Image (cartoon, grey):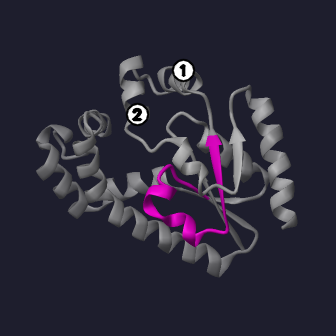
Amino acid sequence: MKIIGITGGIGSGKTEVAKIFKKLGAKVISADQLGKEVVEKNPQVLKKLVKTFGREILTEDKKLKRKRLGELAFSSVEKKDRLNKIVHPYLLSALRKKIREFKKKTSGILIVDAALIVEWGLQKELDYLILVESTLKNRLKRLMEYQGYSRKEALKRVRLQLNDKTRRKYANHIIRNNSDLKGLRRRVVLLWKKLIQK
C-alpha cells in the first residue's frame, strides 16, 4: 500500500483533491472528520476544551458549539496553539491507528487528507506528500462563499496557518488549484496515473 498525504492551507481545495482521488479508487482518511470525532466523542477532550475556552462553547445539552469554539480558538495565535495542544495528541493517535488498520486489511493507495501534516512531522511516515496550492484571492473567495466567513475572518484563518513556502520544502508533488473543477480533476487524474505506476 502507498500512503500519500494531501496538505494545503485552508481554502486551497485539498479536500476536493482527496474526493477526486477517492473517485479514482483511493481510500481516504480525513483528519477533519477524525478531529470532529475526537472532540465530540472523547469526554476528556471536551472537558479540557471547556476548561480552556469556557462553557460558552457548549449548548444547553452539553454538546459542542463547533462554530463558537472556532471563533474563540482562531482569534489569536496563542488560543489556536492552546486548541492544538489539547486536540492534536488525540487526533494524531487516532490518525496513526486508522493508517495501521488500512495497511492490515487493504492494498492500493491510501490518501491522508490533513492540513497539518508538515506541522506534525507526519510526512516522514508517508510515501509521498502532495501540496495543493491556490492564490490568496481564490482561497478567500472559497472561504467566504462556502464556509460563510467574513473577509476579515477568512484572512485571519489563512494567516494563522503555515505558509506554502514552508510546505513546498517537503512536497513531492504540487497541484495548483486556480481554475475550475474540470481543470483540477484533469491535473489530479494525471498525477494519479503517475502514482499508480511508481
- Residue ID at (44%, 61%): 120
**Mark 1, secondary structure of its residue:** helix
Task: Tell which of 151 and 106 is nearer to you.
Answer: 151
- Residue 149 lies, in percent from the top left, at 41, 23
Compared with 157, 23 (above or below) is below
- Residue ID at (16%, 44%): 53
Residue picked out by circle 1: 141
**Mark 2, secondary structure of its residue:** helix
- Residue 86 lies, in percent from the top left, at 26, 58
Residue 179, quarter of picture: top right
Residue 59 visible (yes or no): no
Residue picked out by circle 2: 159
Magenta-span inclusion, residue 127: yes
Mark 1 against mark 2, which lies toward the viewer?
2
- Label tally: 2
Query: Looking at the figure, which quarter contains the C terminus?
Result: bottom right
- Residue 2 lies, in percent from the top left, at 71, 70
Cα separation, mark 1 vs mark 2, equals: 15 Å
Q: Residue type at mark 2: give it.
A: Arg
| Residue lying at the far bottom of the rendered structure | 104
Left or right side of 192 for 15 = left
Tell me which segment is drawn in magenta.
112-132
Task: Tell which of 98 and 166 is nearer to you.
Answer: 166
- Residue 50 lies, in percent from the top left, at 15, 49
Q: Residue type at mark 1: give it.
A: Lys
Which label is found at residue 42? none
